[in-house]
Amino acid sequence: MFNFGRARSQGRQNRSMSLGGLDYADPKKKNNYLGKILLTASLTALCIFMLKQSPTFNTPSVFSRHEPGVTHVLVTGGAGYIGSHAALRLLKDSYRVTIVDNLSRGNLGAVKILQELFPEPGRLQFIYADLGDAKAVNKIFTENAFDAVMHFAAVAYVGESTQFPLKYYHNITSNTLVVLETMAAHGVKTLIYSSTCATYGEPDIMPITEETPQVPINPYGKAKKMAEDIILDFSKNSNMAVMILRYFNVIGSDPEGRLGEAPRPELREHGRISGACFDAARGIMPGLQIKGTDYKTGDGTCVRDYIDVTDLVDAHVKALQKAKPRKVGIYNVGTGKGSSVKEFVEACKKATGVEIKIDYLPRRAGDYAEVYSDPSKIRKELNWTAKHTNLKESLETAWRWQKLHRNGYGSSSSVAVY
Ligand SMILES: NC(=O)c1ccc[n+]([C@@H]2O[C@H](COP(=O)([O-])OP(=O)(O)OC[C@H]3O[C@@H](n4cnc5c(N)ncnc54)[C@H](O)[C@@H]3O)[C@@H](O)[C@H]2O)c1
């Protein structure tokens, strides 16, 4: 502050001296001064003229125009685990992609990788924004011509949702309403919505079909179900094509090793089983705790349906291709086969080659014994079926990325933000 003030007053002193002295008195110098102003003005005018003649001036960005043969997909949460894998697949399949993310949980490093893979103009842009900010979302839709939205962005940890329920209702339910309202206002016709098997709660009968009653038992599942209900009610009187995909437990990463799963360290305590296994294998955690060995399952531990992220994003592309105006498709996305926690841990030990230490503890409140999908509807209607169903192989792929990215995506501040 002090330095700045002094520099200014000195500058003024100098200027007034030259005006009051030599410059003002000498007509030649006065002409020079005027000449410089005229020259600057004409150069500025010339620059403006040239810019106006340039094909890119006045021409809106390619992202703001619908282009025949090009489908422009808005991927919300595209800096996150599943969203980044979906963006990669869409870009590979020649879609135009806009990622919107507030980076609260995702990684700019993932966006940077995508930008490096697809640097050509009009392929990928990243917009930093919070979906809770309706004005910002409206501006994004005004400035971009989207053909479809894949809405991944969400906070997504069951445990955290019980601690901070309002955060979940806001981030999931309320933000989905914002996205839907803005899509309707701007005539965007297709929505692919990321839902979850957590909307079913704890059904008695396995496997879970799309007809299984949805009775969610935690704020995460409830918030997702509310978002689904809003979408379903809206779609009754709308032309929108809607696909709701209810994922089971997502694992794995890009088989070519470009992307991976890198949640923030502070979310570790809420973490998912694969993250916990890898942390234990890397020695970040002393070992693994298996909570509950007396469930009515084959080996007494909980059973879950693990779906590889590569298969999951394939389901999204198929859903996008088959989405029809005025139609809603609801699909379970799982393998149809349950694996126990013990089996998962054994697969993880084999995939990492590390003898992970296991502690067996009593049950954790709120865990249900067995959850697995019946994926026959998505097989029949979307011709989709899970291909990466070998747990050890999916975990090996993910572990390869984890080993090479000990700090996740690291610091990637040099990414271009548009
Ligand atoms: N991972 C799973 O096993 C699983 C299972 C079922 C459903 N899902 C659903 O899949 C979706 C993606 O999950 P993920 O595992 O990739 O999570 P993630 O945390 O890796 O990614 C979510 C992304 O959304 C962004 N985001 C969050 N709130 C935002 C906001 N208000 N505005 C803009 N961006 C915001 C985050 O920054 C992050 O990049 C979520 O909707 C989740 O509920 C995930």
Image (cartoon, helix red, strand yellow):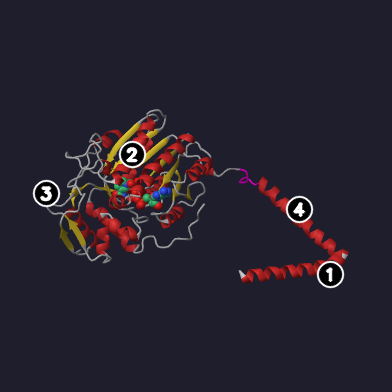
Q: Mark 4, mark 1: which one is toward the viewer?
A: 1
Amino acid carrying label 4: it is: Ser
Q: Is residue 81 covered in magenta?
A: no
In the image, residue 237 lies at what x, y percent?
40, 28
Please name the residue that numbered disc 1 is placed on. 21
In the image, residue 401 lies at what x, y percent?
33, 59
What whole-number distance in Å separates the C-alpha atoms at marks 3 and 4? Answer: 83 Å
Say what secondary structure mark 2 lies in.
helix
- Does 265 sit left or right of 281 as displayed? right
What whole-number distance in Å separates the C-alpha atoms at marks 4 and 1? Answer: 29 Å
What span is in magenta? 54-58
Does the Cβ of the disc 3 residue fall within 8 Å of ligand 1?
A: no
Q: Earlier in the sequence, mark 2 or mark 3?
A: 2
Say what secondary structure mark 4 lies in.
helix
- Does 123 sit left or right of 345 as displayed? right
Quarter occupied by the N terminus: bottom right
Judge the density around disc 4: few (<14), some (14-19), many (≥20) Cα neighbours within 10 Å. few
Q: Residue at x 35, y 39 (%)?
A: 227
Establish if 361 lies above or below 143: below
Please name the residue that numbered disc 2 is placed on. 226
Q: Residue at x 81, y 66 (%)?
A: 19
Does the Cβ of the disc 2 residue fall within 8 Å of ligand 1?
A: no
* Pick the front one: 280 or 22: 22
Q: Earlier in the sequence, mark 2 or mark 4?
A: 4
Please name the residue that numbered disc 3 is placed on. 298
In the image, residue 181 lies at what x, y percent?
44, 37
Chief secondary structure of the magenta portion:
loop
Please name the residue that numbered disc 4 is placed on. 42
